[in-house]
Image: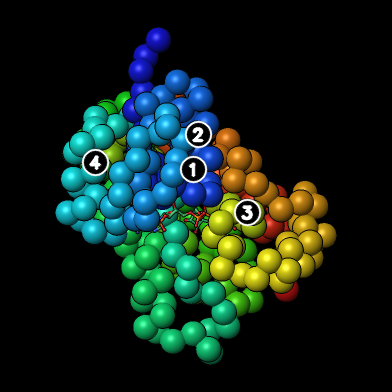
Amino acid sequence: MIEHTALVVGGTSGIGLATARLLQQRGATVHVVGRTERKLDPELIPHWADGGDPAQIAAVVAKAGPIDWLVVSLSGGEGAGPIAGLDVATLRRAFDAKFWAHLTTVRAALPHLTPTGSITLIGAISARAAMPGTAGLAAINGAVEALVKPLAAELAPIRVNGVSPGLVDTPWWSGFPAEARAAYFAQMAERLPTRRVATAEDVAEVVALAATNPNLTATVIEADGGARLAALV
Ligand SMILES: NC(=O)c1ccc[n+]([C@@H]2O[C@H](COP(=O)([O-])OP(=O)(O)OC[C@H]3O[C@@H](n4cnc5c(N)ncnc54)[C@H](OP(=O)(O)O)[C@@H]3O)[C@@H](O)[C@H]2O)c1
């Protein structure tokens, strides 16, 4: 059996952690990266670094490499809201936290990726829908997803794909009061064609497919429960 090594940056929570667990269950050696130390599955190899810091992430990648499957699932928490109330400084921070951190991680990983390897970026369906209050998020995630095709052409034979999730029940939402979050999820579930909010494991299956399938490149998979079709206003 061929041994594979995965590096999941943003792999200590949510979609990244679910992906790391899935790839590990399927036999890969899996390194995960987050900024905050926390207790993880003993089978995962943890690293504590900021994916937006070139020196920190380069040191982790060098330690973990050679890498077959790079997954970038780190997130920012800012950038949502009506554009009139969103100041530019907030939006710049939000770009730093997601877009620039994705790009910094990818650049750091390049020298350590195997030629048959892959890069999978996580965007968001806000980039592909038209939901009021998401212009900032759409711009950030649109920028992440726009990297996929040119990088797939430029870095071939390394494969480059994206996954574009909709609403996913992960710790990302833990900043919202539990009651308000539950009400929001229930309301959204009614409107989604799938009539449910996705789990991190749902999306992880798609991320793992993008990372491992040798025939997939230059693709952004919409793993959104049909959110782009729904009126989520
Ligand atoms: N949940 C949703 O509804 C949803 C919807 C659409 C798209 N997405 C996207 O899916 C991706 C994963 O989100 P999630 O819901 O799984 O979020 P999450 O549960 O908050 O997990 C994010 C992970 O990224 C790590 N992280 C954040 N910034 C980092 C950085 N600069 N360097 C290294 N690690 C970093 C976090 O750990 P530390 O904070 O300790 O670093 C954590 O492990 C994100 O790109 C998000 O925008 C999520």
> Which callout, 4 or 1, points to the residue nearer the camera?
1
N-terminal of the pair, mark 3 or mark 2, is 2
Residue at the spot of label 2: 21
Q: Which residue lies at the image location 54% right of the left edge and 60% below the top edge?
A: 172
Q: Residues within 10 Å of mark 3 (few under 14, many from 20)?
A: many
Q: Position of residue 42 (x, y in %)?
A: 42, 32
N-terminal of the pair, mark 1 or mark 3, is 1
CA–CA distance in space, label 2 to label 4: 19 Å
**In the image, is the residue at mark 3 within 8 Å of ligand 1 by its beta carbon?**
yes
Q: Nearer the viewer, residue 140 or 21?
A: 21
Q: Position of residue 230 (x, y in %)?
A: 74, 61
> Which callout, 3 or 2, points to the residue nearer the camera?
2
- The total number of labels drawn is 4
Q: Secondary structure at mark 1?
A: helix
Specify the quadrant that holds the N terminus: top left
Specify the quadrant that holds the C terminus: bottom right
Q: Is residue 78 left or right of residue 167?
A: left
Residue at the spot of label 1: 17
Label 1–label 2 contact, CB within 8 A: yes
- State whether residue 85 is above or below residue 131: below
Which quadrant of the figure has residue 5? top left
Q: Nearer the viewer, residue 191 or 181?
A: 181
Q: Nearer the viewer, residue 79 or 186?
A: 186
Q: Position of residue 19 (x, y in %)?
A: 50, 38
Amino acid under disc 4: Val
